[in-house]
Image (spheres, rainbow, N blue to C red):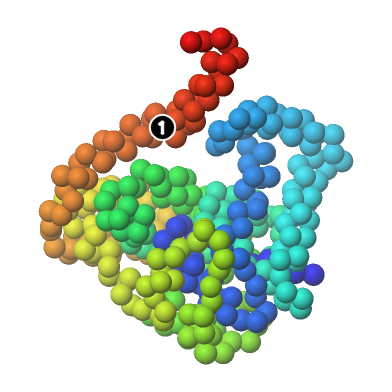
Amino acid sequence: MITPIFIFSLPRSGSTLLQRILAAHPQVHTTAEPWLLLPPLYSLRRGGVYAEYNHQYLHRAISEFCLELPNGEEDYTDSVRAFALDLYRKVSPPGTRYFLDKTPRYHLVAETIIRMFPEGKFIFLWRNPLAVSASVIDSFGGGRWRLHDYKIDLFDGLEELLKGYTAHGDRCLALKFEDMINDPLREFRVVFEYLGLPFEKEILSRFSEIRFRGRLGDPTGRERYTELSREPLEKWHRILRNPLRKAWARKYLHWLGDARLATMGYQRSLVLEELEAVPAGMQYLFSDLIRVHLGVLKICLEPFILWDKVRLLPAWRKIHGCR
């Protein structure tokens, strides 16, 4: 029987690095990013999905179907669990003990996943949220403002992570990216002890040989870092230098608050102090001012959905006889 390991984190928190290090152990198999559990679990949610089949009707149908099951939604999630375990087993080499599922937006369903897999192992990977935001700008935006595209991660996703960890922390392992980089020997001894696997320090260099097939995943760190590096720890300073970015970072820290940050292992006053010590700069300021406002329009108008509807116009013309 295969046992699943789940990594729960925000994007740009070092989850791919952690995945590669764990995958360097012969008893752990993984693939780039499965995303298997999001569709069946989101079928239990009315919102959050735009689909041709009309997701609201699907949600209603499955909810009503669950009412006919002896144990309701519990039977449904038990079957989803069996479906996932079967696929994890089939994709793993014979004799493998663990399958590691690292899917970024599992943060939206973290608590449900923990409840679904009583035998599972769950690693919450935290990182300074300002460093996460800066890395999103640097890696996904090419240095330009793009945080509006990741508000689901930075806000909703973070709240769901904290909810899952608060409810089930006794079954989980919490790991900070900064500790993982600063003292990898100590941190990974703890990680492998949690998994019940022997730890060999050679794993911390062998991870550079790990490659995943598939287009999803984080190629940035894989290509840039073939060994553990301290460079990402302070890189966020130069990315959040201009006045707009620093102002946004202050507001984000205010929203996070002391309690959320403490649960993650950070102290707001210290993070804010580090932010204020970042020397001011003007790079990307004009671009940011434009992109911030465009980002609000993008959130409100959802142009990808609009474009999908425009794409269907030729078919509508044929049906309705439009010229």
Can residue 232 be seen in this snapshot?
yes
Residue sitting nearer the eye, 307 or 260: 307
Q: Secondary structure at mark 1?
A: helix
Residue 311 on image: x %, y %: 49, 28
Looking at the picture, tell me which residue is in the foreground, 40 or 274: 40
Question: What amino acid is found at the position of numbered circle 1 in the picture?
Answer: Pro
- The vertical placement of 178 against 40, above or below, is below
> Does 104 appear above or below 307?
below
Name the residue: 69% across, 31% down.
58
Spot the residue most to the right: 70
Q: Residue 54, position in %: x, y? A: 63, 28
Q: Quadrant of residue 200?
A: bottom right
Picture residue at 57% right of the left edge, 36% below the top:
49
Q: Is residue 246 above or below residue 266?
A: above
Q: Label 1 crowding class (10 Å Cα cut-off): few <14, some 14-19, many 20+?
A: few
Q: Is residue 67 left or right of residue 198?
A: right
Is residue 265 visible to us here?
A: no
Q: Which residue is mark 1?
A: 303
Where 163 sits versus 55, above or below?
Answer: below
Q: How many marks?
A: 1
Relative to 95, 219 lies left or right: left
The image shows residue 110 at horizontal and vertical percentages of 59, 54
Residue at position x 61%, y 30% from top?
52
> Quadrant where the N terminus lies?
bottom right
Residue drawn 80% across and 40% down? 72
